[in-house]
Amino acid sequence: MVLRGGAGIFHRTDTRGNIATGFSLNTNYINSLDAGQTPSSGLTGPYSLQRPFPDGIVSPFGANLGIATNFGAGVSFDNPNRPIPRTRQWSLTIERELPWSSVLEGSYVGSRTTQEGRGIQIGDMSQADWDRAQADPGFYQQAVPNPFFGNAQPGTVLNSQANVARRELLRAYPGFTSVFDNISTFGRVWYHGLQVRFEKRMLGDRSKAGAFTVVTAYTWSKMMENALRNDFAFAWQKPISQVTGEDRTHNFTTAMIWDLPFGKGRSMLTNLSPTGQALLGGWTVNFNLIYQSGVPLPAWRDWEFRCGDPGAVQRTEARWFFNDCTRFNECWRQLRPFEYRELPARFHQLRSQTAPQFDLMVNKKFNLTERFRLEIRGEAFNAFNTPLRGDPPSTNPQGADFGILPVAQLNFPRNVQLGMRLYF
């Protein structure tokens, strides 16, 4: 029996988005001058295809405007004092030799990353305003006179619209349609996994069946992160725990290697002629099986489902989860404006399509002379041509393709390749 363990701390590379606010600006097209009630353009004149940007093209101001940079539009920033994310990893393994040339190994592996960057909107309304807006959304959506009309930077929304929704004036930073912190450091990611490996070497080289080795590994794991249900001010939002987009609960692999027992130096047909040895002797066959759970599907966060478990259906390609459009009004309710989302970003119980994948390989070595040796190899990846379909759309119950597996195939179709290698 062998006991192994270890732990370590790793620091992330200090990567940021190289934000160039003030040095790289877009000239936005203004599609309405009255908060979306009517379009801004006619067939000709300002805002039409004839003159889409009547106020001219916005020129970058660099750092000359200071905190007024992008006034009338949105800004984002990378905190220059951001601490470097760090990951703590640990593992504990017990390995046991068993009879008949076999080994069983079990491991617990874990990791935890802190100070992970999370994007967060800090320029929206206060929690009190959000709570009141749920009861009276029309008050916050009502068009009111825009005090920044003609006073913001040319080409921005607030400079061009005489009226804006009242919500725009109740933001934490009025005059900016968005203030986004790209790398707020409240993020955490953690992983726990049970890993089991079994290796069996059956039948030595002198056996009648030839050498045969099997290595099987299985991992049962969960990878979680904390995030926000709503992209509002971090000051009053509490993060929740949810599975990551890379989480795969089960991962099973098996690899088999069989030296066929035919030919010289093996237990059967040892007296083959040179031609027989070239055709039958010295072959090795490899077989790999890989199966893993699908990844979590994105959640319909702007909708409420009211008909029980959406995964409790007879799963088909056309119904990966509940998507009965004849019961749409009964089972679905779209969230009202300003209503808080209750779902995480992705589901744990609804996952992408998956299927076992098989690879086969055969190879043989020829001793041509004392100096030259030739190896030929044939490989078939996805040997049984098992497709893995793309993720079914899962965020908009009104979509015609909602809950239907797309025709697109994620994995490669069967791929057969032949190779030859000369040793000298």
Image (tube, rainbow, N blue to C red):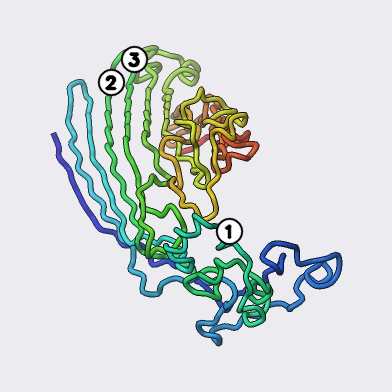
The N terminus - image quarter: top left
Q: Residue furthest right?
A: 44
State whether residue 47 is above or below residue 230.
below
Mark found first going from the N terminus, 2 or 3? 2
Q: In the rendered image, which quarter is residue 404 located in? A: top right
Q: Residue at x 37, y 31 (%)?
A: 252
* Local SS, label 2: strand
Is residue 366 among the parts visible in the rendering?
A: no
Q: Nearer the viewer, mark 3 or mark 1?
A: 1
Q: Return the mark for residue 214.
A: none
Q: Nearer the viewer, mark 2 or mark 3?
A: 2
Is residue 195 among the parts visible in the rendering?
A: yes
Q: CA distance from mark 3 to mark 1?
A: 80 Å
Q: Which residue is mark 3?
A: 209
Tell me if label 3 and label 1 are in contact, CB under 8 Å.
Answer: no
State whether residue 304 is above or below residue 28.
above
Spot occupied by residue 227 in the image (x, y as percentages of width and height): 39, 54
Label 3 is placed on what type of residue?
A: Ala
The C terminus - image quarter: top left
Q: Residue at x 55, y 85 (%)?
A: 65
Local crowd size for mark 2, using a 10 Å CA cut-off: few (<14), some (14–19), many (≥20): some
